[in-house]
Structure formats: C-alpha cells, structure tokens
C-alpha cells in the first residue's frame, strides 16, 4: 500500500508539473497572468471521459489530441477576447471565462453535473493491430507520464529559443517598443495563449487517466490559483521553476494533510500551507529555481582572468 501511495504521488506531481509549465508559458514568457487556466485543464479532463467509449478502451492518440484540441479551441475563443484587455482586467476576464465553463459542467448533465463522471477504461495505443504498451500497468503509465513531461519540456525549450520566443520575450519586456519596431504583438500573444491552453488540456487528459474520475471542481478558480502559486513559488522566469513549484506545493499539501503527523489538525491544512507559501515567497523572491541557480553560482569557482601582455613592436610602425 505504501508503494502505491508514493507511485500515485509521483504521478500527481508529474501531471501538475505539466499543468504548471503550461501556465509558465503565459506568465513567464508572455507576461500574461491568468486566473482562469483551470478551465482548460478541466476541459481536457472532461474530453478524456466524454469521448471515451463506456464499454471498452478508446484509442489513446486520437483521444489525447481531441482533449488538447478542445482546450485549445476554447482558449482561442476566450483568448481572442481576453487579450483585448490588460493588467487586472485581463485577470478578471480570464476568471470570468473559467467560471462560465465551470458552471456549464456543474449545472448541466453534460458531464454528470456536480457529481462528475467516471472513466472506466484507460485508452490503448494500438499500432498495426498490436499494443506496444499497456497503460493499465502502473509502471508503464507513469513512464508515459514522464515521457509527456519530457516532450512538453522539450517543446517549450525549443519555443523559448526560437524567433517566436524572442518576439514573445520582447513583447513581455516592452510591448510598446515592439510595436514601434513593426511587430504586431497580438498574434504572438494569442498563439502563446492557445499553446498554453493546449498543454493544460494535455495535463487534464492525463489527470483523468490517472484518477479515472472528473468533477467540475477541476475547472474552479481555486485550481487556477493553485497552479499560479506553483509557478510563483518555483520562479516565473524559468520552466524548471514551474516543475519545482509543482513538486513543492503538492508535497506541502500532502505534508499538512497527514493525520499521522498532525492528527485532527490535519483537517485545517489550508492555514499552515498558506503560511508556508507566504514565508517561501518572501524569502525566495526569485523562487526555488532562483535559489538553485544562486547555489550553483556560489559553488562555481571564480574564473581568474589574466591580464593580457602588451603587444611588443619593433621599429617604426607602417604608415
């Protein structure tokens, strides 16, 4: 039982790391602080359940792409409207769109209402009639989760180093100057927004596969606040910070919810978790990734630069 718990905890951390990476693309790379990102996470999760057959495993790749496409489609529509605003207005508009999606699933029978819906079979990957791996095997499933995390990390790293990433960084730093230089910044922000929502949809899809159950609470604003805390705690400027923040916050939640450590006080875990986050953010303004980078710099030996010897010349210089 103990081994199953830690395997499940590792899977939860990986999924939330992917979710946090999707928001880090918006916050850290594009400068877009969203408080409605959970909507796309939840849409991806519901797509996994609602599009899967009830009596047999569905096809893995089509379902995964459909979940990402559903989240990206809602992201394209809402992003095209939300990006017309700035600052706190953008935050409020994204929150409003997320709450709209939340109540669609909560107040209608489309996804089982407030009771949620079950995924009875994990999807299968079949190639030429064969199944190269079985996601019903916990070890295989968590290997698949790691592969998805690595793929998302690699994609975002390439995006960051591309001309698109450079333009996005310029827009974040000084959008007015980018416009003066002839760049139309809106398409860059919209593409980044849609990509972030698609990755969030992937995280939601994986969450549904892991738990086999989805509820409207996956789209609630608390979930959006949770993933935003992960990005801030880890360090907004670095993708590694999103992964570190996700791991730290999930582990802190598990710590303060432990009845073995805190007894009946574990039911009040929100209070110590909030205090811990406040202390960490106050002490680590650059996040956990900034702390790690500072330690690496402290341990790295200083480079001694030898002064260059003056160039010796003989005779008169040439005219």
Image: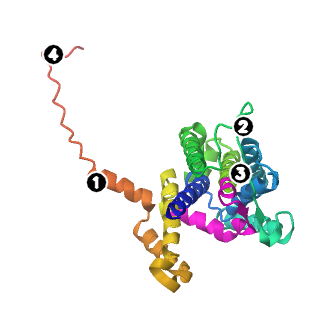
Which residue matches tag 4? 316
Where residue 268 sits, quadrant-wise, is: bottom right
Which residue matches tag 1? 298
Q: Are marks 1 and 4 in contact (CB under 8 Å)?
A: no
- Which of pointers 2 and 4 lies earlier in the amino acid sequence? 2
* Side of 150 relative to 214 (left or right): left
Residue depth check, mark 2 versus mark 1: number of the one nearer the observer:
2
**How would you classify the magenta stretch by its main secondary structure?**
helix
Residue 214 drawn in magenta: yes
Q: Which residues are magenta?
A: 206-232
- Which of pointers 4 and 3 lies earlier in the amino acid sequence? 3
Which residue matches tag 2? 126
Q: Are marks 2 and 4 in contact (CB under 8 Å)?
A: no
Where residue 115 sits, quadrant-wise, is: bottom right
Q: Quadrant of the C terminus?
A: top left
Instruction: Please tell me whether mark 3 sits on a helix, a strand or a loop.
Output: loop
Judged from this view, the residue extending furthest toward the front is 1
């Amino acid at each position: 039982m103990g081994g199953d718990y830690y395997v499940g905890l590792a899977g939860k951390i990986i999924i939330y790391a992917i979710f946090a990476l999707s928001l880090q693309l918006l916050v850290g790379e594009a400068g877009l602080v969203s408080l409605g990102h959970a909507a796309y996470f939840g849409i991806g999760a519901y797509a996994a359940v609602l599009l899967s057959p009830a009596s047999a495993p569905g096809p893995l790749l089509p379902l995964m792409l459909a979940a990402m496409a559903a989240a990206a489609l809602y992201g394209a529509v809402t992003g095209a409207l939300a990006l017309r605003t700035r600052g706190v207005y953008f935050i409020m508009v994204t929150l409003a769109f997320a709450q709209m999606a939340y109540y669609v699933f909560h107040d209608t029978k489309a996804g089982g209402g407030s009771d949620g819906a079950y995924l009875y079979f994990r999807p299968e990957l079949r190639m030429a009639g064969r199944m190269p791996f079985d996601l019903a095997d916990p070890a295989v499933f968590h290997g698949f989760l790691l592969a998805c995390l690595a793929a998302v990390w690699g994609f975002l790293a390439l995006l960051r180093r591309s001309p698109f990433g450079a333009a996005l960084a310029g827009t974040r730093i000084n959008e007015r100057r980018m416009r003066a230089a002839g760049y139309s910044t809106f398409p860059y922000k919209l593409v980044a927004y849609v990509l972030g929502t698609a990755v969030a949809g992937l995280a939601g899809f994986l969450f549904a596969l892991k738990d086999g159950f989805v509820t409207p609470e996956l789209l609630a604003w608390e979930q959006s606040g949770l993933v935003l805390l992960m990005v801030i705690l880890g360090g907004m400027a670095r993708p590694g910070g999103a992964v570190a923040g996700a791991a730290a916050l999930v582990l802190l939640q598990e710590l303060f919810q432990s009845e073995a450590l805190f007894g009946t006080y574990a039911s009040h875990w929100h209070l110590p978790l909030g205090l811990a986050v406040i202390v960490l953010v106050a002490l680590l303004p650059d996040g956990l990734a900034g702390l790690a980078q500072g330690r690496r710099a402290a341990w790295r030996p200083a480079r001694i630069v030898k002064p260059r010897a003056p160039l010796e010349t003989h005779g008169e210089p040439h005219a």
